[in-house]
Amino acid sequence: MANLTPSEAWRELREGNRRFVSSEMHNPQQNVQRREETVQGQNPKAILFGCSDSRVAAEIIFDQGIGDLFVVRTAGEIIDSTVLGSIEFAVSVLGTPLIVVLGHDSCGAVGAALNALDTGEIPAGFLRDVVEKIAPSILNGRRAGITERDELGAEHAVEVGELLRERSVVINEALEAGKLAIASVTYKLVDGKAYLRSVIGDVEETPFPPGESAVVS
């Protein structure tokens, strides 16, 4: 696969999602030949940093195959040093041109953070870490007038994209050089569509306005 621009990478993911939504999946590059082609190395078209939710399987919802996506997943798209290191590897070593931050509706991690903020009851164990890292996005969203749970989750996905740029010199330098873009996206479980919420860099598509519910287009 030739190196893609950020816009070309997003266009391929967008088309794959459209195929998934319409049940016209090509299931590309999911065969023995592709498996053998990737033995010696990888050249993914995008980094997919998404929620661990079992209903949001990246290669399936974007109709991609072996070697197409470099996938990093944590509950609620929570950033830590290993997440940053993994993404930086794909950016700096593999030259991957696009980071997609993928949130979704009915997110349990977002729901847990909302419950903790509303009731004052902090969950036990390491789930507390997840809640604590999502809470600032919810508070920022509420200050902006957002009240609906799924839209607060979308706000979190947008803020995660900004945090990737702020916390990683490698990512920020690639963005400034025009070699990389970050697309924050939300996935709607009921219709299977991926909705672009914000962009850092250029993917030649206009995001939904902040705070507005995604509509079928």
Image (spheres, helix red, strand yellow):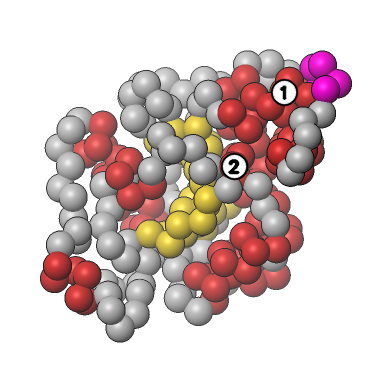
**Residue 45 spot, x, y in % from top left:** 37, 63
Quadrant location, the N terminus:
bottom left
48 or 109: nearer the eye?
109
Q: Residue at x 78, y 34 (%)?
A: 124
Residue density around tag 2, few if under 14, some if 14–19, many if 20 or more, within 10 Å: some
Looking at the image, which residue is at 19% across and 58% down? Answer: 30
Q: Is residue 6 visible?
A: no
The span picked out in magenta is 117-121
Q: Using the rendered view, name the quadrant where residue 151 is placed.
A: top right
- Residue 159: x and y in percent read 67, 42
Looking at the image, tell me whether mark 2 or mark 1 is earlier in sequence order.
2
Q: Nearer the viewer, residue 114 or 217?
A: 114
Locate the C terminus by quadrant. Answer: top left
Which residue ends up furthest to the right in the rendered image?
A: 120
Residue drawn 21% across the image and 76% down it: 37
- Tally of numbered discs: 2
Asked if residue 93 is among those painted magenta in the image, a careful observer would answer no
Q: Residue at x 34, y 58 (%)?
A: 8
Kindly identify which residue carries mark 2. Answer: 75
Q: Secondary structure at mark 1?
A: helix
Q: Which residue is mark 1?
A: 114
Look at label 1 and name its amino acid.
Leu
Q: Is residue 81 above or below residue 121?
A: below
Q: Which amino acid lies under the numbered mark 2 shown in the image of this protein?
A: Ala
Side of 209 relative to 66 (left or right): right
The answer to whether residue 158 is left or right of residue 135 is left
